[in-house]
Amino acid sequence: MPKVTFYPADVTIEVATDENLLRSAMRAGVHINASCGGSGVCNKCRIIIEEGEASGERLPEGGWKACDTYPVSDLTVRIPVESEMDRGALARPAATKAASWIRSFGEAFKWDGKPAVHKMVVELPKPSLNDSVSDLYRLRRELAQGTLPDVSLDVDSQVLYELPDALRCGNWKVTVSLMEGGKPDHLRLIKVEAGDVMSEHLALAVDIGTTTVSVQLLNLNSGEVLKEASDYNPQVSYGEDVISRMEFSRKGEGLKILQQKIVECLNSLMDEVLNGAGANTEALGIVSIAANSVMTHFLMGLDTRYLRAQPYTPVATHFPPVRAGELGMEVPGHVRIFPAPCVASYVGGDIVAGVVGAGLNRSPELTLFIDIGTNGEIVLGNQDWMACAACSAGPAFEGGGIRHGMRATTGAVEVVHIQPGTWEPMALTIGGRKAKGICGSGIISLLAGLFTAGALDQQGKFNRNLRGERIRPGRDGWEYVVVEAESSATGQDIVFTEADVENLVRAKGAMFAGYLTLLESVGMGFEDLERVVLAGNFGSYLDLDQAITIGLLPDIPRERFFFAGNSSLLGAKASALSWQVIRELHQVAQMMTHFDLSDNARFMDHYVSSLFLPHTDMSLFPSVHPAP
Amino acid sequence: MPKVTFYPADVTIEVATDENLLRSAMRAGVHINASCGGSGVCNKCRIIIEEGEASGERLPEGGWKACDTYPVSDLTVRIPVESEMDRGALARPAATKAASWIRSFGEAFKWDGKPAVHKMVVELPKPSLNDSVSDLYRLRRELAQGTLPDVSLDVDSQVLYELPDALRCGNWKVTVSLMEGGKPDHLRLIKVEAGDVMSEHLALAVDIGTTTVSVQLLNLNSGEVLKEASDYNPQVSYGEDVISRMEFSRKGEGLKILQQKIVECLNSLMDEVLNGAGANTEALGIVSIAANSVMTHFLMGLDTRYLRAQPYTPVATHFPPVRAGELGMEVPGHVRIFPAPCVASYVGGDIVAGVVGAGLNRSPELTLFIDIGTNGEIVLGNQDWMACAACSAGPAFEGGGIRHGMRATTGAVEVVHIQPGTWEPMALTIGGRKAKGICGSGIISLLAGLFTAGALDQQGKFNRNLRGERIRPGRDGWEYVVVEAESSATGQDIVFTEADVENLVRAKGAMFAGYLTLLESVGMGFEDLERVVLAGNFGSYLDLDQAITIGLLPDIPRERFFFAGNSSLLGAKASALSWQVIRELHQVAQMMTHFDLSDNARFMDHYVSSLFLPHTDMSLFPSVHPAP
């Protein structure tokens, strides 16, 4: 890869030939003004190429547009004064370099090679007049005399329909699929196939999020991920959040529609990954699904009426394996769905799977597991105990309740740097398109950047002395103009308002109060935390220092933070691959002590103290220094 | 009831006012010529009423037609010489008085009051913010803390759909239905209903015969039979016997059609008994079904291809409880069918249920269980061991392969007495209608009567010296005219031929050889038999002495014989009422040693020796004395 050196900062990084120089400057921690998000409109990101060869758009006044210039060879790039900023404030690597990632499952867990459904080849003696026992008894006898002497074997009645032909077509050699029964020494015979088809043994791991559904196709012989696919949860058309969907589910056929929609989505994603791998549904043994409590209820077609209102009782939290075909999945009758167990209304199977996927229950280290989604679920504990809570943080960090907040899709401002003094932004959008709004990571970027640059005070108010083109009074109080109307996709200014800041401060305050309350409940403090695991795709784009700066995360040594990515999917994958992990899911769901924070006086105290940037008690944030 | 004395025999019996005097004479053992089967056509059954009042048809020549005359008061009846016969030959009471009946289940078994599905009322604490566990967990917790502390509880996923409303509609009092799980301390929660509905707790007991289907509706609280119904097996339209139905099942949708037909029949009989009892399917807990191996395969929709051909392997013999709805029964999802287990291709669940219904497995007495149907299944044993075999007797005793053989329906000659010397018959038809043919009991009657009267010799040949109107050469060799053309419903002579006799001798020979082979295999003889149980509706109409006379049953003291009636239904009923009995069915099916007689040299020897009336070895039949 070409090496690119940026002057005057004198920072050198390797840059892929398909990464534009604006994005690589952001990675290198070098500010270039760019208020159009990198869409090529504002012409503010002028750079001078002093040495080397580049391809891209030259500007009439000389230099190149950083957002549309790509390295061909090693380059020396100079940022002109009007595009430059103070070097010190950016002297840190980008987010994904600051913190480690949770190692992938294959590394975190030593796979035991024992999924909940395993296959086995059995050879039987042919029947004769002296040995004319039934086909089923012949198979049972062979299993009992052979590999499974002390096992109590239940049999799916479905097996009886495939058994006679399978035995004879396979010339008395068959492959049986045996499912763990939930009790020691109990197995369930769920499928018989002619001959040796050991090699065809697949599973689906599924994460059903309120917004996104992700699927992995796994090879149960090797543990390998063959294909992945994801899509938006089609239930979104019937309600953006779980509350509005629960409302919808009560009307007429609402519940049925939501159930059908999610199953259609699963069928379509399943087709995609199976086709991609050249496989078919007959080879599937398991569908392992992790989802929050509401999504789990909808998938199962269960009434959420009582989940929605006090005292928020789910119909069930632990589910037996259920036939996927009964729920509408287009799979053979033997395929079961193993839904991850839930703990309470707002601590669902996604959190339980996430905790297990991140290995909390296998480690002695005291870990804080944080899923900053709509509700902000947190889990504190280790292999011996766990406490969990939902913080009612609200959707601000997903862009909800933020004037120009939006999902992390093309055209969302995903990262912003503010140049102190000029208050000019260096903004990048997803896909380098004209900005439509600001997504979660962009929001944190803005909040932290404005606070660090001194544009926002600890109360979350704009410094009235800085009134200008960027900072000005607006419809909802004062606001910061991130992208001007002429550069935006909407033709209007993209702004970040004091009302937005207030929402964000409330959200991060709820999270932080949650951490403190759980820690206090076990007589501990932040200093005792050995690991902090950030779950969700959100975490992947988070700038750790910025998140600490605004008080969303505790100010502890950075090496203790881990991003787990989609830990819910990680847990679903782990449980698809291992029966032991499925059991651990249920153990974890049972061992979790659930704290209802809505009813907790200590939580309220901590919450009020957290409604500052980063906190009223600055001793909790030794590394954060507000601008004077 | 009026007393009727018949002269010159001087026999007095009580006669219901709706029983005609021909039928009561037969009961009293008094011969009256009647060659039209009692249909009022032949005018041969003239009697003189010497004292008392009767209603009925007077004959122009004086006297009354016995077949259409009913007692009003006590009567003295004289049989005129032309209608009379030798008194001695009839000096025995009628069949049903000679032998006892198996007592009904309620007496034979002391009911333990524990069906496989039991109901229980549970009251739960209401949820609160401090106790907002899931509905299912709340129920589990209460069961674990209350009545079922050490039980492992599986839950039908179906329960989750009814649980939330049941709990709240019942104000936190519900009735749960729990099914035995086949393992100790395992139960399965299959239904939850609001409030206390303990009183609604029903089961169906079903016997699916090749010809007839019988259903009983049972109250699982009291053990009482609420309603009964039966109908012909509608599969008859696709084949009279199991072989032709198995043929049909292989063609196109044949198997599916047979499966649907039997399920339609079950649905219709179920509706009939439920409507009759004013109940509905929601109250059903269990459907217990006994059927032969082929009928069981058809019910389950299983391929009989390998059951039909050597080495006659069933797909399965023991079946797990199967959801009745999955087979097409119109019942709620929680209702399971418990099929009685089979032993081998021709020793099915009907025999296993029959053996258990007759209590063989609970008695130390050495018992021979005989089901004289198409195949003639026999079981020898007691509570400690059992041996079984199918004798391939063929359907002769059901009228199959008999020129004028027919099923036991209206118009079938059911009993015949032959007057020695004149060879005139006294024949009765079912329903007193014109004769259409001869059913099983009529066939035995004829064979025994002709043999006893000296018209047939030990080889089964008619005495050529007796040639006359009744005994004559015919199309298939010699024959006996039972009903003349002018009195029959068909307008043709109803005859009983030497070819018929040959078929019957082969059939009874196969049965008898079967008894001897099983007994020999355990080193025993007829003298060791403590009980002989005759199963099937056939047995109910059988004349015990006649059956012994022709060598169909062993010549042992008559008090050792018991008629079980429909023992298959009796077993189905017992298993519907008691989980213990279901377990006994499976134990019995497993303990039965199956002898394949088709392959057995001793059986062939015994068979050849049995092809005489009653047997070549007359020492086996001390009470039978052929006419000189």
Image (cartoon, coloured by chain):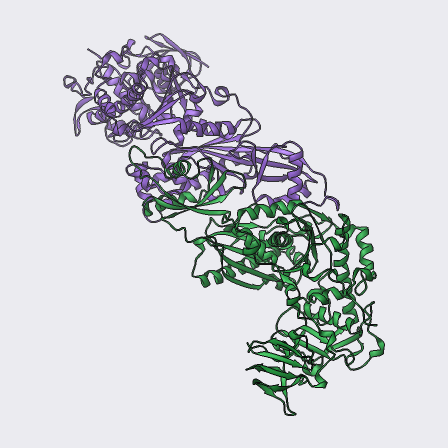
Chain colours: A purple, B green
Could you tell me which residue is drawn at 59 percent across and 46 percent down?
A: B584
| Relative depth, front residue between A285 and A178 | A178
Image coordinates of residue B534 in percent, x first then y, are: 66, 59
B445 or B168: which is nearer to us? B445
- Residue A95, horizontal then vertical, whole percent: 36, 17
Relative to B174, does residue A20 appear above or below in the rendering? above
**Left/right of residue A392 with respect to residue B3 in the rendered view:** left
In this view, B15 is above or below A488: below
Horizontal relation, residue B591 to residue A85: left or right: right
**Residue at the far left in the pictured view:** A465
Farthest residue toward the bottom?
A: B61
Toward the viewer: A368 or B82?
A: B82
Pinpoint residue A337: horizontal percent, then vertical percent.
Answer: 48, 37
Q: Is residue A322 left or right of residue B126?
A: right
A239 or B390: nearer the viewer: B390
Residue A37 rendering spot, x and y as whole percentages = 31, 24
Q: Image quarter for residue A440?
A: top left
Q: Is residue A240 visible?
A: no
Quarter residue A56 falls in: top left
Quadrant in which the C terminus of chain A is drawn: top left
Image height of B133 relative to B597, above or below: above
Q: Residue at x 56, y 42 (%)?
A: A156
Q: Give the farthest residue toward the right.
A: B465
- Whether residue B202 appears in this view of the structure is yes
Callout count: 0
Residue appearing at x 32%, y 40% in the figure:
A306
